[in-house]
Amino acid sequence: MDLNPILSRVDADLPAAMDRLLELLRIPSISTDPAFAEDCARAADWLVADLQSIGFAASARPTPGHPMVVAHYDGPPDNSGPHILFYGHYDVQPVDPLDLWDRAPFDPAVEETAKGPVIRGRGSADDKGQLMTFIEAFRAWKAEKGSLPFKITVFLEGEEESGSPSLIPFMRDNAAELRADLAMICDTGLFESKVPAIVTMLRGLLGEEITIHGPNKDLHSGMYGGAAINPIRVLNKVLASLHDETGRIAIPGFYDGVRELSDEMRSQWQSLAFDHAAFLGDVGLSVPAGEQDRTPLEMLWSRPTAEVNGIWGGYIGAGSKTVLPAEAHAKLTFRLVPGQDPLDLREKFRAHVRAQLPADVTVEFHAHGASPAGEMTVDHPAFQATRAALSEEWGRPAAFVGCGGSIPIAGYFKTELGMDALLTGFGHDDDQIHSPNEKYAVESFHKGIRSWVRVLARLAG
Ligand code: BES
Ligand code: ZN
């Protein structure tokens, strides 16, 4: 098939496509903060209208949380060709700390940078810019050819950044409607910002919040200090006990079930020649801080972590205050790898904490999200087709890589719907996702759209 007319249309339509993306980026769809619930619904409605405009039967489906967008495009009358589901998420992370942004996070714009033009704004790379790459590819294809080449379902979530609480019930309730031959997930990046990449291993995530209680009220540390236990001291001991001096996680049983990398993956990753000095150098660091007997790529992609994300308690205002606080708090997340069961690890973590509490101290646990790691089998013929399409567009062979981040649905397609999932995306390591000044390269957006056109053509056969 001659793709040039479609690709030329993508090129010519790029300014209009960017305008559409900027419109979507102006909607502050922060899923984790209830104050933005209406904006999440607005983003879902915007996407429904956009998908309808290119011929999809689209609707926003209510959930106990934010709506899901589900849209269908019927394939050819003879039902030939595959049925592919495309997934992205329209929700975004909170914007704080706001004072570190160079422009308002929801007033997006195209900016020139030393590395080329970028679209600046919250959600530009994670994930609105990415999900619009496949929608724009559908638009260009339809405009040029009159119809899309096979049956397509689009599934856009509004709770990915808050752990996807409504996802499993929704997938179960709508299983027949969502089941397709394969899911394509567009929410990841290029390898080292230049090589197109298909993710075959993705870490899971377990969230916990703990409160350590000591005395029944805040105390004067002169009157009680020495005799009264300080909950911050207990919290520090507990947090310091999570790792040993070699970087290994010291919670008993934490590595139960963790598998060594297969020979095939090990050699795939070795061939990537990852520049860890540049990777760490870009963020002002120099020495990999994980398990000392592991390579940096293993630390990032195939080994679990325990991280403290926030810690508070006592007096943190201006000046000094001699308080002996009643409570101390921390938020933690664990990145998980295949073989680890999130709920089992939650209990192991809790037991490890309880075992260290001195007299008079109690602990309260609050559970945050839990999703297992995902391991993608690459047997489905679509993997080779997508690899070829990406290599063609980017001029370099596409790599099979791991991803240290988490996308809860990646594993659920298999466990809930029996489908394989293929993860690819066009983000750069320095897109500052989840951080101030998030951006998406115009090149990522443009070549991302062109990549999907090539993928559609290959999948159509
Ligand atoms: N798009 C990211 C996942 C990602 C991170 C891909 C880094 C490539 C590189 C996704 O939206 C995300 O941030 N997920 C959260 C999941 C969590 C809130 C359940 C994450 O990984 O922290
Ligand atoms: Zn994302």
Image (cartoon, rainbow, N blue to C red):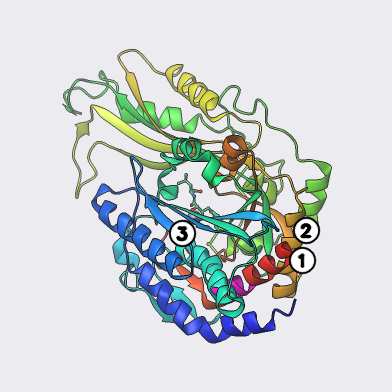
**Amino acid beneath label 1:** Ala
| Disc 3, SS | strand
Extent of the magenta region: 444-450
- The vertical placement of 65 against 120, above or below, is above
Answer left or right for 255 relative to 345.
Answer: right
The picture quadrant where one finds residue 144 is: bottom right
Residue 55, x across and y down, in percent: 48, 67
| Image quarter of residue 164 | top left
Do we see residue 45 in this rendering? Answer: yes
Q: Around disc 2, counting alpha carbons within 10 Å, would you say few (fewer than 14), some (14 to 19), or many (20 or more)? A: some
Say the numbered circle drawn on residue 388. Answer: 1
What amino acid type is highlighted by mark number 3? Answer: Ala
Q: Check whether the beta carbons of the residues at disc 1 and disc 2 lie within 8 A of each other.
A: yes
Residues marked 3 and 1 touching at CB (< 8 Å): no
Report if residue 433 is visible in the image. no
Q: Which mark is residue 222?
A: none
Magenta stretch: includes residue 447: yes
First of labels 3, 2 by sequence position: 3
Residue nearest the viewer, comparing 253 with 111: 111
